[in-house]
Amino acid sequence: MLCEELPKIMWFENDNDYTECNYLFHYIIIPSPKDETMTVRIWHGEYCYEKSKDEIVSERTFPLTVEGREEMIEYIRKEDYDYIQY
């Protein structure tokens, strides 16, 4: 299941990105400690984020908090579920 290995909030507070995929469903979490936010970008396809920036199908920003991390996990899992159903 996606997000099983998702780092704890301190990872993002230290301005580290995180990416994961489930076959052709990919996401990246890009933190902005200065703004106290984390942005999730989702794309579908075979390529990494750097080669897929024009193929983002969904993007959402969450607070850089433990609660924001939990909301983000729910969002990612729902987007993955919707993609699988499509």
Image (cartoon, grey):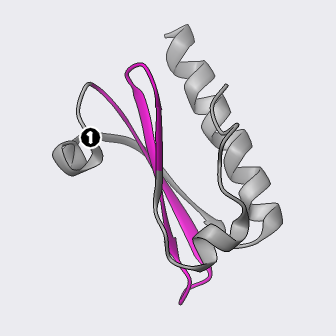
Q: Is residue 75 above or below residue 41?
A: above
Q: Tell me where the magenta segment starts and ends, as one range.
A: 19-45
Looking at the picture, does residue 53 appear above or below residue 86?
below
Task: For the N terminus, give its image quadrant.
Answer: top right
Mark 1 Cα-neighbour bin, 10 Å: few <14, some 14–19, many ≥20:
some
Q: Where does residue 18 sit, x and y in percent of width and height?
A: 49, 55
Residue positioned 71% across, 67% down in the render: 9
Q: Give residue 4's position: percent from left, percent from top.
A: 70, 37
Write the residue at 49% across / 10% down.
86
Q: Secondary structure at mark 1?
A: loop
Q: Main secondary structure of the magenta part?
A: strand
Task: Determine which residue is flagged by label 1.
Answer: 48
Relative to 43, 66 lies left or right: right
Number of callouts? 1
Q: Is residue 28 magenta?
A: yes
Q: Residue at x 45, y 42 (%)?
A: 27
Residue extending farthest right = 67
Taking the spot 23% from the left edge, 33% from the top edge, the residue there is 47
Up/down of 23 relative to 21, above or below: above
Question: The disc labelled 1 sits on which kind of residue?
Answer: Cys
Tell me: 5 left or right of 82.
right
**Image: 67 above or below 1:** below
Q: Residue furthest top?
A: 85
Q: Is residue 6 magenta?
A: no
Residue 78 x/y as whole percent: 66, 30
